[in-house]
Image: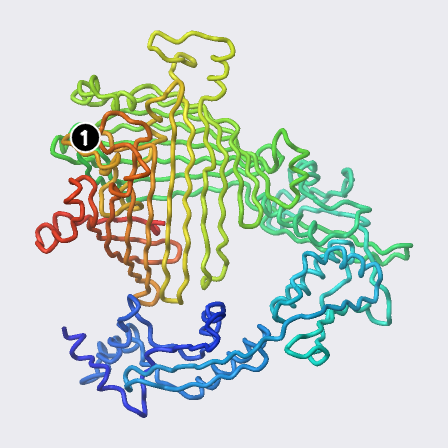
């Protein structure tokens, strides 16, 4: 109460020192206002004090608290370290804001806006209202091109459909800049090495047609002294590797000629064929800025060089045609990379004997190692080894030994900087980063429930271009062996199909297609999308086809087998869509929608493999429920073990706000969703039905705090259920129950995590 009562903001303000509470923009032309509100607001030069949860000015209150009473070091700490001085309404800032808005609107075609302002409200809650009449914009009524060079004129005309300038559109400065850059890139990609965007100008005639209709002229001049623009061909390409002054491997040598370029390795063990597949440029071809940029990107993506320098110089020799020479200088990176990452871990795991879920704590260490250029073809061999110990606790679990869960996992990836087996396709996709990844892994896990061993091998192709990455996995094979570590659980499994499906030896042969999209800008003040879509995963297609074609018999167990083990058939798709909505430097909202479906068929028409099923709850899902404590659907009985599903729907919204110096953050969140079985299995309300699935949605809400160190985020979230599908239909809305503090305490879930939940 001291912070609230001692800091009565109104008594600190006066008509001579009005506190800025809010800026407000009122646009007369409301039909188009929504397109300009945010950008106009960004032109305002004086912003009010930072708000917490959109309403509470905590920094201002700390400052005023530190300014009251007798001054001391603590009061100074409140004022200057935690607090934020009040923002006093300043007319000079308001005038500057009006000028900035007017200049901005001019870039959008509104040349004669009217902007007035007024300051309203009490002194401690002053609102500056900007009243705008944008007026009528000048629109493009006719376009004329004035291009001195007829060849350039024909190139620009042929590609005019890609123009940013369209008839009927307002004259926007941004579109003119984009058009200037587009034409420059177009010509430089067609051999015009010496062309610069300064040769492109625009002029307007706003009087000829009247009624705010303008004639737009696009002018492309010739260089100085009326010379025509020349096209340049590539004369020579020279690549050299410079290990650097500190390298003991440096061996100066004469360059060799390899196909279309000269190459001086200087002791660096690199097969020149790697450069041949990486270079998108070749002698006697026209200069192309696009191919130069693509070559630079590909050389960097090899991860072999810490410095890539491409220098393009016009040829001074007197020849019949203009030409350029390429000099590419490469400085190698370290061949070996090694790191150790110790971890404190917390997980949630179901006890299959008691049917309950408990939080576990433990220690882990991750060892990673990269060997670059291992076969002299820019290949990268990656190793990752993780070892973890956890202490699982529960009423039926002995406290000795203290660490009773162990995990050891080794992953190895061999990465090739090309599409193995598809080299023609690799060259055709010249503007993407292409990789082939051969992967293998082995995992051993032992806990109070089981011993589990997983072996896997896979082949993966990746195509990356700007914000989009495609992944194609033609083949992946996984063998999973699980044995009981608990006699009670072994006896219980004899009559439980769910446990039988977990502890059967599983063989999964699958193929996958997926994509990843992320349009996040290096600037932190932009909204962006993140989309991960596992478009389709198919398992068991090849062995199924073999059995069908050759009419092979089933095994004694009643299933088809491969290498003496039953294989699975399923089709699966999963999409995770996130939108980060930037409000201002202190506030943003993040939305997430995750939808997935897995359909078992043929040789495994009852269950999808345990590792491929959907689960929910926990620190990165529906935080008001423990992991694997929900579903399927509304089915819930004492001692229930199966909390997995074939269908998943989950939605999350989290409002994040800065509390202190951008290191300490707060969050308010709502999570909702559930999992369902896709086929009827005799359990009431466990199967997904389009007509009533919404009645089985779980929902939770809560708040959290984050310590944001930029490179690492520590997180704690408190959550309580709002809708609990585990209860009968009439009692699923549980929020009114929390009038009783003891019930609120019992329902509370505390989640710890590293990184944001999504």
| Colour setting | rainbow
Expressed as whole percent of the image width and height from the top left, the position of residue 419 reads 61, 34
- Give the percent coordinates (x, y) of residue 219: 76, 69
Q: Position of residue 67 (x, y in %)?
A: 24, 83
Which quarter of the image is occupied by the N terminus? bottom left
Residue 654 lies, with reference to residue 18, above or below; the image says: above
Dividing the picture into quadrants, the one containing residue 657 is bottom left
Across and down, in percent, residue 280 comes to 70, 45
Residue projecting furthest to the bottom: 16
**Crowd band around label 1 with a 10 angstrom C-alpha radius: few (<14), some (14–19), many (20+):** some
Observer-nearest of 709 and 342: 709
The number of numbered discs placed on residues in the rendered structure image is 1
For the point 80% across and 47% down, the residue is 285
Vertical position of residue 32 compared to residue 271: above or below: below
At 29% from the left edge and 87% from the top edge, which residue is drawn? 123
> Residue drawn 50% across and 9% down?
550
Q: Secondary structure at mark 1?
A: loop
Residue labelled with disc 1: 640
Residue at screen point 66% across, 53% down: 309
Query: Which is more toward the observer, 424 or 210?
Result: 210
In the displayed structure, 435 sits above or below 743; it is above
In the rendered structure, the answer to whether residue 359 lies left or right of residue 208 reads left
Q: Nearer the viewer, residue 244 or 591?
A: 591
- Quarter-of-image position of residue 203: bottom right
Is residue 174 shown left or right of residue 756? right
Residue 529 appears left or right of 216: left
């Amino acid at each position: 109460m001291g912070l609230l009562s001692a800091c009565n903001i109104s008594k600190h303000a006066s008509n001579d020192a009005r506190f800025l509470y809010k800026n407000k923009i009122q646009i007369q032309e409301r039909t188009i206002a929504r397109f300009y509100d945010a950008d106009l607001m960004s032109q305002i030069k004086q912003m009010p004090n930072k708000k917490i949860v959109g309403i509470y000015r905590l920094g201002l209150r700390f400052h005023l608290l530190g300014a009251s009473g007798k001054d001391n070091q603590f009061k100074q700490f409140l004022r200057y370290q935690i607090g934020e001085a009040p923002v006093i309404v300043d007319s000079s800032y308001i005038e500057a804001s009006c000028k900035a808005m007017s200049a901005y609107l001019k870039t959008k075609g509104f040349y004669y806006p009217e902007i007035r302002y007024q300051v309203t409200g009490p002194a401690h809650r002053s609102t500056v209202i900007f009243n705008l009449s944008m007026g009528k914009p000048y629109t493009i009524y006719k376009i004329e091109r004035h291009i001195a060079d007829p060849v350039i004129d024909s190139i620009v005309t042929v590609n005019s459909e890609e123009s940013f300038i369209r008839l009927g559109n307002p004259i926007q400065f941004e579109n003119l800049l984009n058009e200037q850059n587009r034409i420059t890139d177009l010509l430089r990609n067609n051999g015009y090495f010496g062309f610069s965007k300064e040769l492109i100008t625009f002029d307007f005639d706003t009087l000829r047609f009247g009624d705010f209709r303008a004639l737009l002229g696009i002018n492309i001049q010739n260089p100085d002294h009326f010379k025509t623009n020349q096209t340049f061909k590539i004369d020579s390409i020279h690549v050299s590797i410079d290990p650097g002054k500190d390298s003991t491997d440096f061996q100066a040598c004469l360059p060799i000629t390899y196909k279309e370029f000269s190459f001086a390795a200087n002791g660096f063990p690199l097969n020149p064929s790697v450069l041949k597949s990486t270079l998108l440029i070749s002698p006697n071809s026209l200069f192309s800025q696009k191919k130069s940029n693509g070559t630079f990107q590909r050389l960097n993506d090899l991860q072999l060089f810490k410095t890539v320098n491409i220098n393009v110089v016009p040829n001074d020799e007197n020849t019949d045609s203009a030409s350029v020479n390429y000099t590419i200088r490469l400085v190698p990176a370290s061949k070996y990379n090694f790191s150790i990452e110790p971890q404190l871990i917390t997980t949630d795991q179901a006890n299959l004997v008691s049917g309950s879920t408990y939080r576990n704590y433990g220690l882990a260490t991750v060892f990673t190692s990269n060997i670059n250029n291992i076969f002299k073809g820019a290949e990268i061999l990656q190793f990752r080894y993780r070892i973890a110990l956890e202490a699982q606790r529960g009423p039926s679990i002995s406290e000795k030994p203290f660490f009773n869960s162990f995990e050891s996992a080794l992953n190895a990836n061999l990465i090739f900087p090309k599409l193995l087996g598809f080299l023609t396709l690799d060259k055709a996709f010249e503007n993407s980063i292409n990789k082939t990844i051969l992967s293998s892994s082995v995992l051993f896990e032992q806990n109070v429930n089981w011993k589990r061993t997983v072996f896997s091998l896979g082949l993966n192709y990746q195509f990356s271009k700007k914000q989009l990455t495609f992944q194609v996995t033609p083949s992946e094979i996984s063998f999973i062996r699980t044995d009981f570590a608990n006699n009670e659980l072994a006896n219980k499994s004899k009559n439980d199909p769910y446990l039988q499906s977990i502890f059967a030896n599983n063989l999964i042969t699958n193929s996958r297609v997926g994509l990843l999209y992320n349009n996040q800008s290096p600037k932190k003040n932009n909204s962006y999308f993140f989309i991960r879509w596992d478009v389709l995963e198919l398992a068991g297609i090849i062995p199924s086809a073999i059995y069908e074609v050759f009419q092979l018999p089933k095994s004694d167990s009643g299933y088809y087998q491969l290498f003496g083990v039953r294989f699975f058939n399923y089709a699966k798709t999963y999409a995770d869509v996130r939108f980060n909505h930037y409000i201002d430097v202190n506030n943003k909202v993040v939305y997430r929608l995750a939808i997935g479906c897995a359909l078992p068929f043929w040789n495994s028409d009852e269950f999808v493999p345990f590792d491929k099923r959907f689960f929910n709850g926990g620190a990165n899902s529906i935080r008001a429920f423990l992991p694997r404590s929900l579903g399927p659907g509304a089915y819930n009985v004492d001692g229930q073990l199966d909390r997995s599903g074939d269908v998943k729907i989950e939605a999350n919204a989290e409002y994040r706000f800065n509390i202190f110096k951008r290191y300490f953050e707060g969050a308010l969140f709502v999570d909702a969703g559930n999992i369902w079985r896709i086929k009827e299995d005799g359990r009431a309300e466990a199967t997904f039905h389009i007509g009533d699935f919404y009645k089985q949605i779980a929902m939770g809400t809560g708040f959290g705090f984050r310590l944001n160190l930029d490179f690492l985020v520590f997180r704690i979230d408190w959550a309580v259920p709002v809708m609990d599908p585990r209860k009968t239909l009439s009692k699923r809305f549980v929020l009114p129950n929390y009038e009783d503090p003891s019930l609120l305490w019992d329902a509370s879930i505390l989640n710890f995590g590293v990184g944001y939940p999504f």
